Image: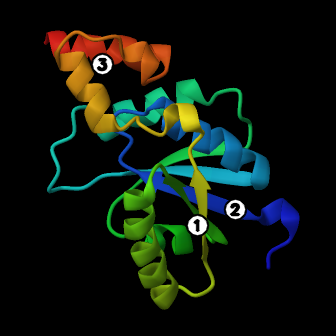
Amino acid sequence: MADKKETLALYAGSFDPLTLGHLDVIKRASKLFPQLIVAVGVAREKNPLFPADERVELIRSCTSDLKNVKIETFTGLAVNFARSQQAVAMIRGIRSTTDYAYEVQMALMNRAMTPEIETIFIPTSPQFSHISSSLAKEIAIHGGDMTLLVPPLVAKKLAEKIKR
């Protein structure tokens, strides 16, 4: 394993938008590793509400107090990006048993492709286990209180996007 100073983990997702659950996992993972990359996926087949550069800036603003967290974008497989960054671990947030079933399958596939990278599951804190990016967007569309689901800056930007 790499020297503790060089140990890097990667937390990949679309983060469209960043939720309080994502932020919870980022904060907790940043305590476990000297370096954490939050990797924002750019998928050509998806039509995100926020372009990648906006997602990066929102996450950067919401994590500015976490000095060991870096935000990057990637295309393709997250595990390949993790390897290119010399990560020793991939962080996955788990909200439910449904998430767990899917994430175990993905972890086993990633392990087959890159056995040198471990997958670490971090269950979201209970108060965030019901939150998803899709739910946040749905609440925003119908004028609900987004501050229960996303950080205040994200709620503001989400409201602006929906009004357009």
The residue that disc 3 covers is 158
Q: Which mark is residue 21?
A: none
* Mark 2 residue crowding within 10 angstroms, few (<14) / some (14–19) / many (20+): many
Q: Residue at x 46, y 29 (%)?
A: 57
The CA distance from mark 1 to mark 3 is: 31 Å
**131 horizontally vs 119: left or right:** left
**92 horizontally vs 117: left or right:** left
Position of 22 relative to 82 (above/below): above
Q: Residue at x 33, y 40 (%)?
A: 52
Position of 117 relative to 163 (above/below): below
Q: Regarding mark 1 in the picture, which secondary structure is present there?
A: loop
The residue that disc 2 covers is 8
Q: Are marks 3 and 2 in contact (CB under 8 Å)?
A: no
Amino acid at pointer 3: Leu
Q: Quadrant of the N terminus?
A: bottom right
The residue that disc 1 covers is 85
